[in-house]
Amino acid sequence: MILGPVAQIVAFSLCALIAIAGALGMATTMSMFRSGIFLMASFIGVAGLFILLSADLLGLLQVMMYIGGMLVMILFMVLFSHDPGGAMMAGMQLPIIEKFFSLGLLPREQKQDEHDQNEQSGHGGNGHQPMEQNGQDDHAGHADHGDQDAEQNGHDEHAGQNGHGGHEDHEHMDMSMTTPIKKPAAVLAVLVGVILVGLLLLRPAWPIVAATPNPNSAEMVGHLLMGKYMLAFEGAGLLILIGIFGAVFLARAGHFPDERGREARVAVDAQPTAPEAPALQPVADADPPDAAELVGVTEIQTRRNLEKDGRGEQ
Amino acid sequence: MGVVLQMPVVLAALLGGALLTLLLERTLLQRTQTEPGPAAAVDYRHAVDPPNADRWLYPAGPVLALLGVALATVVIPFGPNLIGEDLGIGVFYFIVVVDFVVLGIALGGWGANTPDAVEACYRIVAQLVAYVIPLGLALVGAIMMAESLSTVAIVEAQTGLWYIVLQPIGFVLYLITGLMQAYRAPFLEPFAASIQQGVLHTSGGWQAMAWRLALSGVLFVVAAMGAVLFLGGWQGPLLPGPVWMLLKTYGLMALMLWLGTRVRLRSTAQMLALSWKVLIPVGLVNVLIVGMLILLGVGTA
């Protein structure tokens, strides 16, 4: 499909805008998830430029690589460290560019109470109510528990509706990307850009060829890869294969059971031990019929306490 | 055809296709009584406003997913001259733009910022890693025999004999990876009932509509591409081309959905294990067999 000159300029501007805005957003946002998405957008903008240059296969390869690659990279980033920067950034006074790229992020909620959330974690998972409901509406659903219990549960649910960030104790974590070097770095980047564009413009003469590009680019690329550049192509394949072997080797379970660090860590103990008694004293004080409806560790602990109390009385 | 004319036609094809897909899927679900997954009921009337949502990424999800499906519909030929645009790299383009659905679900899930939706975001990315390579290997066989990436050329290369006869392994591989790519029955982990259908639970109003269209559309384009690659596309006796194409598409879709309900649901980890331990080796063997057939002169013009 051949575009007219106007359409070409419009398409070029759009792709260039996506590429530059994506790169700028990637460098200025503090949310790691957004940063990855902006980088992906930037590469997709560059892929659009490839397609405009009739290198459609290369452009699509770039899109495919970066959608898959960036998503997996973001997933690993988030699995290792959550995304504490986004909520932090939303509440900050920022320069205009950072402000723009942080639009739509919500600031971290203030903690409404200082109850220990871990204590009631057995109840925290049941956030199945519609989204509009907030903590206080849950009184009706959990009327069986004591008043104190329901109050706590409601707050838990409220906190539990956060999918990422904010619900752990990131209060003291500094994800700020503002460094003193930022301004000189920005000036340097603009300077390099100006020099490169200047070099392009000042180049004496661009050779212009009348030939139209081959529409069957896949075939040409294939012939080049399997002919002229075969050694580099196969070498890259070999390196990737060795990389996969290395990853499998590192990830497999160890041959030697006593070798720490190689064995898979499993979070479930064979025989779970109940936490210390004092933390759960208020639950044990509640009347016995309610205790049967509690779940998880709390239930076991309550039963043990009741048994202990019963034996004590006899 | 100019772009102005192409776009409404392609969109109409997508709308009609997605509607028929939804009807077929609903009928099958009622009969088998299995977990609905992406076909679960959604609320079109009320907008959902998740309290901690990311105001940019949350609405971007369904838009990107729908964009990906609409772009994928462009290269599907419904008749000899009934195609949005016959791209020279059509099949590869198809694989790439369907990835935008995964990107959309990841963005929508993360943006909604509820535990279930974020879980859906994680699961969909893991599923992408599981299906994308065996899917590519399933397509490579058909591309090798037709000696072209263009969908029209692939259909025309099957004039004598459909590729399902020559490449049964590739077809089975496409059935499995197609179900993974469309997030249907055994592989519906990102839309499982245990996480409240993931992104569907946190969407309402226009977003629910867009998800419905995108998720029905992705099954439609996957089945249509299967019909193009292995069942000879629009070709067939007596009936006109588009009718054959629709018959094959929905026949293949019904087969995929029905087979999917015959096995129990797979977790994401099981999907990854299946993919890397079984499907990829089988796909490589398929490529080898197809290569030998081509050397023997079978299936090529």
Image: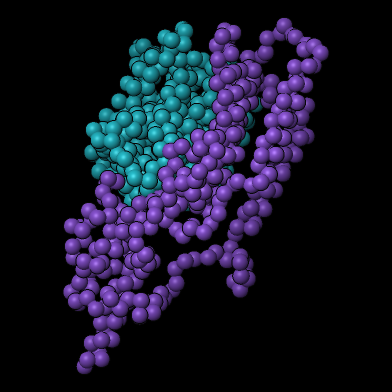
Q: Quadrant of the N terminus of chain A?
A: top right
The relative height of residue B223 versus residue B74 in the rendered view (above or below) is below
Which quadrant of the figure has residue A67?
top right
Left/right of residue A255 with respect to residue B151 in the rendered view: right
The relative height of residue A313 versus residue B47 in the rendered view (above or below) is below
* Residue under the point 21% across and 61% down: A142
Task: Give the chain coloured cyan.
Answer: B
Q: What percent of the width, then of the height, locates residue A212?
A: 68, 9
Task: Give the chain coloured purple.
Answer: A
Q: Nearer the viewer, residue B301 or B109?
A: B109
Which quadrant of the figure has residue B14?
top left
Left/right of residue A192 with respect to residue B123 in the rendered view: right
The relative height of residue A304 versus residue B158 in the rendered view (above or below) is below
Q: Nearer the viewer, residue A266 or A137?
A: A137
Which quadrant of the figure has residue A241?
top right
* Residue under the point 31% across and 59% down: A155
Q: Nearer the viewer, residue B273 or B84?
A: B84
Residue farthest right in this picture: A204
Which color scheme does this rendered protein use? by chain
Left/right of residue A292 with respect to residue B224 in the rendered view: left
Left/right of residue B13 with respect to residue A287 in the rendered view: right
* Residue under the point 31% across and 56% down: A157
Residue A244 in view: yes
Residue B226 in view: no
* Residue under the point 38% across and 58% down: A111
The relative height of residue B221 versus residue A39 in the rendered view (above or below) is above
Q: What percent of the width, then of the height, locates residue A46?
A: 61, 27
